[in-house]
Amino acid sequence: MANTMARSFLQAVATEEVATPLRVVQIEGLVILKIIKHCKEFSPALVTGQLLGLDVGSVLEVTNCFPFPIQEEDEEIEADGANYQLEMMRCLREVNVDNNTVGWYQSTMLGCFQTVELIETFMNYQENIRRCVCIIYDPSRSNQGALALKALKLSDSFMDLYRNNNFTGEKLREKNLSWVDIFEEIPIKVSNSALIGAFMTELEPDTPVTQGDYDRLQLSTNPFLERNMEFLIECMDDLSMEQQKFQFYYRSQSRQQAQQQAWLQKRRDENKARKAAGEEPLPEEDPANPIFKPIPEPPRLESFLITNRIANYCNQINGVTGQSFNRLYLTKALHDN
Amino acid sequence: MAVRTVLQFGPSSATASLTAKVNPLVIFNICDCFVRRPDQAERVIGTLLGSVLPDGTVDIRNSYVVPHNEFSDQVALDIEYHHTMLKSHLKVNPQEAIVGWFSTGLGVTGGSALIHEFYSREVSNPVHLTVDTSFGSGEGTIKAYVSVTLSLGDRPLAAQFQEIPVDLRMIEAERVGFDILKTTAVDKLPSDMEGMELLMERLVSLINDVYKYVDDVVEGRVAPDNCIGILISESVACLPKLSPPVFDKLINDNLQDQLLLVYLSSITRTQLSLAEKLNTAAQLP
């Protein structure tokens, strides 16, 4: 009897290893306000901060956060940064705040956050924490009236590939991984304690129109769209450069193959001549010959990231223009009346 | 010939113009700390950070809680913790300095005077903010006090907590949306289009209300109020007076610009999918 009990306990412990997939990120209103304040204060500079919370089943709860100071490009400040983090976590622990790091947040400018640094940071965090998430906040888009908050994490298949540094075309085709699969966006839920709810209900002003509405009804979106287009054009330039690199690679590879064939043909002819003359045939391969050296394939990571960025800009432009249509028709109707 | 010494209040002219502006983040922080307080503590105490604006208003922008122990009339504050947190916060934002302290609970108690004295050693004229989390008087009251010295003739007698007006700048909270911040759980953040939709509905209902009001006044059902009438006529006059063809041209130009951008972004998307197909599908024999 005891044996079966023990086995079932072991079984239960063993099956715990399968992690439930992260389905939703639950943020507290306090964290949202803190992130907004920090990012807005330092915009247009980009800032980061740490997220603290709990990891419960398929929900990642974020209950508090603290900002990171802007780091100078100095080696000795590195230790300072780590010290700062430890001190903050220790102090927060004393006042019963969850001491668990669950990720980090960063601000971005018009959505150009898909960079290699982001992926590197993700890999660093992933080594220590089982589940971590990155929250991106865009203060320039929030000036248009929408709350531009996103929770991201790297998809598992991408992480495996990146860890093995296996970024060739065949591997990608094998796993059917395209640029869409790098980042996964997780839906955000907001929760507040009842006390805060009571206060906010109390303090809510009586006007039926809020500041958010004023922001949304602004007719002048031109500066925002202009900057979006600028970034889009720059990214297209980068993408075309990457394309050229690929084309060069393919061309040189096919050229190399042609050279190899020609050399092989020459060797075969030579061998025939030597056989006819009764000498030893030369080997058909010559690893010392430079035309046999395999050309390294350029990494596809950068082009994937650029593609992601471009898609983001396109989405943003679509969103903003959709809103502008609404506003223009509204103005038209008002004027007609 | 009785010489009457009058109880004088300290420099009241300075405090008369003093107001405190509180960021909603501070309220959130205080409530969150209160919910997380250790079981035996009745209230939480902490430091307020911010700056003093040139016109004398105290702008309270951030806060952190400081652990403390309170006995009958003795208060022990963890000063080292307070200094450590202050240093950490200053690293991030050097402009935020101590401007005062907060405590939960209605009104001021005896212990508060001691704590206020401690804080007045750190900064001159600290502001004491009380946030009533127990909703004692039936509503959540947020009050701010400054210390004013009472002097009898020339001799300082005591210090009095004098209330100063509090201005809750809820602009940030409004931007996020009170719907999100009010309820205990929101299932998802509203997207752009949904926000636009809600906004349109609200605008339409507002216009309907104004319309109904003007109708009522014309019919004589409601007594006309001159101020409201002036406001309405001013807002209607705000619409730019352009002749119809000029206005149409303006709108159409804008529309065409936006359409062009949408077209551009669709082309870019197509280009992206083509490029991807070419890149990954190309293989050499």
Image: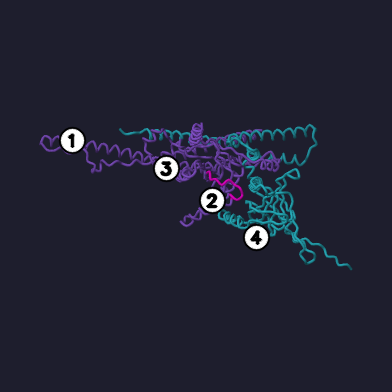
Chain colours: A purple, B cyan
The residue under label 1 is A268
| Element class at badge 2 | loop
The numbered disc on residue A230 is none
State which quadrant residue B55 falls in. bottom right
Residue visible at 36% across and 40% down in the picture? A244
Q: Residues within 10 Å of mark 2 (few under 14, many from 20)?
A: many
Identify which amino acid the numbered label 2 is placed on.
Answer: Phe
In this rendering, do the residues under marks 4 and 3 share a single chain?
A: no
State which mark lies toward you, 2 or 3: 2
Badge 1 sits on which subunit? A
Q: Is any atom of residue A34 visible in this view?
A: yes
Identify which amino acid the numbered label 3 is placed on.
Answer: Asp
The residue under label 4 is B122
Circles 4 and 2 in contact, beta carbons < 8 Å: no
| The magenta stretch spans residue B240 | no
Q: Residue furthest right?
A: B1
The residue under label 2 is A68
In this rendering, do the residues under marks 2 and 3 share a single chain?
A: yes
Query: From which residue to which does the magenta span run?
Result: A92-102
Q: Residues within 10 Å of mark 3 (few under 14, many from 20)?
A: some
User: Which quadrant does the C terminus of chain B fall into?
Assistant: top left
State which mark lies toward you, 1 or 4: 4
